[in-house]
Amino acid sequence: MADERDSSVPDETPERVLDRLTDGVFGLDANWRFTYLNETAREIVCDAAGESFTADELRGRNLWEFVPEATGTKFESQYREAMRTREEVSFDAHYAPLNAWLEVRAYPSETGLSVCFRDITERRRQHDRIATRETVLREIYEAIADRESSFEERVDDLLRIGQRALDTSHGTLSRVQGGEYVFEVVRAPGDLSAGDTVDLSVTNCERVILTEETLVLANVAEEAPDLADRAGNREWGISCYLGTPVVVDDEVYGTFCFYDTDARTEPFSDWEVTLVDLMGRWVSVALERKLTEDRLRRQNERLEKFATLVSHDLRNPLNVAEGWLEMVSEECDSEAIMHVENSHERMRAIVDDLLLLARAGRTVDDPVDFDVAAVAADAWSQVETANATLTVAADVELGGDRSRVQQLFENLFRNSVEHGSTDSRMKSGDSVEHGSTDNRCESAGDSVEHGSTADPLSITVGPLPDGFYVEDDGVGIPESKREHALEFGYTTAEDGTGIGLGIVDDIATAHGWQVAVAESEAGGARFEFTNVS
């Protein structure tokens, strides 16, 4: 039968197939002499040796003599290991003369070694870029999450990280004040330091301020010659620049930027621009928070000073009035005197609450550890509890401002005693005979005989999975009223100030706790404090 193959197509030999591979393939005999090289291997081997030969010319040449730079490298040790053990080896290695990463597989036989390899330099560089970026992002997170460091220290860390990632000599956070450019945080060689001021018009940052957009210049002279002529650039020799606006309260505060005296040979990458934008946005948010906290601190300080002055000015005439009232009570017996005394007591309560209100909401900056039971006991000793009882079932330690937490308990205990064991504890329609002290009638229409006494109010402090609760067995707070119970001014008592539970909420908030008003199992009031650390 005749051969029907096209005689014009040459036979596909193994050598021709191997020559079309993008991977390099070469063979070595037992004496490390080349027995075969495909075209890719020939090119790489010749590049490594710095000489040009054909594959035929390379056959019979000793690998280590032809490429002596490979001696002592991982390539030699792995090839020799494969020949010695007669087992396949696979490895990645960097070949310095070519500045290339190669992925290698070596297959030994009784007559020598077959080696397959591919250039994975770009893949390795991509891997290294990803690893580097992960490291940078981790460092940024660690810097901004460090609560022990000040805002300025964290910005300094970000500038340090950015300088290394961008390979620039300068990094600054600056603020614009009118036509001046004030350096606030600086990382730079030379005499430039925080507090220095220059005219805004001589800087690149003026354009960032005016456009409210990130400015990216790999080569200032080529990409923005009008900026290159500015006095600041000429004086400092700025040749590349990457800066982003810092926005606070919807207005441009200043710039967060990096620059260098050498122009870049390559443009700033999208990753580098995104990195600076990311850091600049954190600076904007953190700075806005810092300025807000500074304003609140000053307001709180003014409020506390005002409350102290007011309480002092109120206490003096109140003391005088009480002194005169005491003299009047010795001279006459009138029911009016009791009403005046009650009014004086209410005024003192309001003054005390004003002072507590001014101090309660300050953020707890230096918490200390203490035992809840001990603080509750101290608070109980400061409250007029009548015949109420306290049970502490919470073996809990927490961190916070012990004095303010004690005040929180005092206000809760006082609230329970005053609103849980007075006539507010009687159900609608209850009637009480003259002289009765029982105000805890259980159902409408119940009556209490003269001289009857009430069951003592019971108050309990107990644990929660992430906090604690305080509850009583009084009449409780109606469900429709609970969402307002912690608001300032809310009270169900005729002589209540409506401040006590608001102070409780402020103290809890200052500690980062959450407060919920609920009903106890006995139907009384229950206050749950969670997110407690």
Image (cartoon, grey):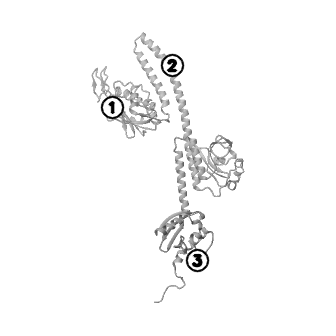
**Quadrant in the picture for residue 494:** top left
Q: Secondary structure at mark 3?
A: helix
Rendered image: mark on residue 56 = 3
Residue 322 in sight:
yes
Q: Residues within 10 Å of mark 2 (few under 14, many from 20)?
A: few
**Amino acid type of the residue that numbered disc 2 sits on in the rendered structure:** Asn
* 136 and 469: which is toward the camera: 136
Magenta stretch in the rendered image: 54-58
Query: Which quadrant would the N terminus be assigned to in this image?
Result: bottom left
Which tag, 1 or 3, sits closer to the chain's start? 3
Query: Mark 2 highlights which residue?
Result: 316
Q: CA distance from mark 2 to mark 3?
A: 112 Å
Do callouts 1 and 3 mark residues in contact (Cβ within 8 Å)?
no
* 405 and 446: which is toward the camera: 405
Do callouts 2 and 3 mark residues in contact (Cβ within 8 Å)?
no
Q: CA distance from mark 1 to mark 3?
A: 101 Å
Nearer the camera: disc 1 or disc 3: 3
**Amino acid type of the residue that numbered disc 3 sits on in the rendered structure:** Asp
Q: Residue at x 46, y 68 (%)?
A: 85
Q: Residue at x 32, y 35 (%)?
A: 521
Query: Mark 1 highlights which residue?
Result: 473
Q: Is 406 colored magenta in this rendering?
A: no
**Amino acid type of the residue that numbered disc 1 sits on in the rendered structure:** Asp
Residue 179 in sight:
no
Q: Position of residue 507 (x, y in %)?
A: 45, 33
